[in-house]
Image (tube, rainbow, N blue to C red):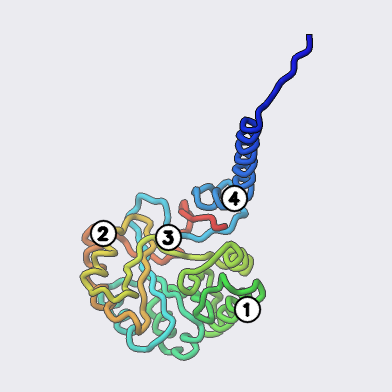
Amino acid sequence: MRFIYVVSAKRLKQILIILTAVLLAAGIGYAERDTISAFSGSTTSPQAPQAIYKVDTKEKKIALTFDISWGETRAIPILDILKEKKVNKATFFLSSPWGQRHPDIIKRIKEDGLEIGSHGHKHDNYSKYSDEEIRSQIGKADTILKEMTGQKPALIRMPNGDFDKRVLQIANQMGYSVIQWDTDSKDWMNPGSEAIIKNVLSKAHPGDIVLMHASDSCKETHLALPVIIDKLREQGYEFVTVSELIAGTSVQSKEIN
């Protein structure tokens, strides 16, 4: 006995739509597989470029970090506060053109025993640059800061905190760990010293990296800093450099596509 199967045009159309949808979903999943893993917190690929945001520890250790790109009036008051409060461990990320113009302040940072990292050369978003230009910008800063401090920086915070996978790969290849932050003081918005204090104290946690600035555009950091230091100490926190924080600990990083 022979059987003849008849499929209506409407039914055939439905089947084709379903098959198309399945194939499209599979294609998108394949194309986006790296993006999905990049933001899932997966660390299955040890070679994947990563940026460090915090450290997984129960010890009450915290790293205060200060970016400087321009100006000459804010850095010294902040250094004075750190010295007055006996905070001799913090990390400054310096733009190399700023460093060239302020060798005296770099000398002061070194004399106070504070850590110096790179903030790149041109203060711009490097993710829009070619690979060659990214290397050039990081390399220029590397050369200048090494000449001025006598030591190659091991840490870099990209200008504006901007990067992509290429930037991370190139920075890693040039011997740098890319440092971000988990707590943003938002002092760059000049929201008032009370807001800056709240932004830090409400989010600070063991293993935290705190973002602050010592550029002239941030007019209230020095007003908030003494209170931040006192309150964190009251909570039992110890101030350390970023290098000390990440040494021998479980780093919380994010893979970037």
Q: Position of residue 255 (x, y in %)?
A: 54, 55
Residue at mark 4 to residue at mark 1: CA–CA distance: 30 Å
Tell me, for residue 245, which label it has, or none.
3
Q: Position of residue 217 (x, y in %)?
A: 35, 82
Label 2: few (<14), some (14–19) or many (≥20) C-alpha neighbours in 10 Å = few
Q: Nearer the viewer, residue 10 or 173?
A: 10
Quarter the N terminus occupies: top right
For mark 2, give the secondary structure.
Answer: loop
Residue at mark 2 to residue at mark 4: CA–CA distance: 35 Å
Residue at mark 4 to residue at mark 3: CA–CA distance: 34 Å
For mark 3, give the secondary structure.
Answer: helix
Q: Tell which tag, 4 or 1, sits nearer the viewer.
A: 4
Report which residue position mark 2 lands on.
Answer: 202
Q: Are marks 1 and 3 in contact (CB under 8 Å)?
A: no
Which comes before the other along the chain, label 4 or label 3? 4
Label 4: few (<14), some (14–19) or many (≥20) C-alpha neighbours in 10 Å = few
Which comes before the other along the chain, label 4 or label 1? 4
Report which residue position mark 1 lands on.
Answer: 136
Residue at mark 2 to residue at mark 3: CA–CA distance: 20 Å
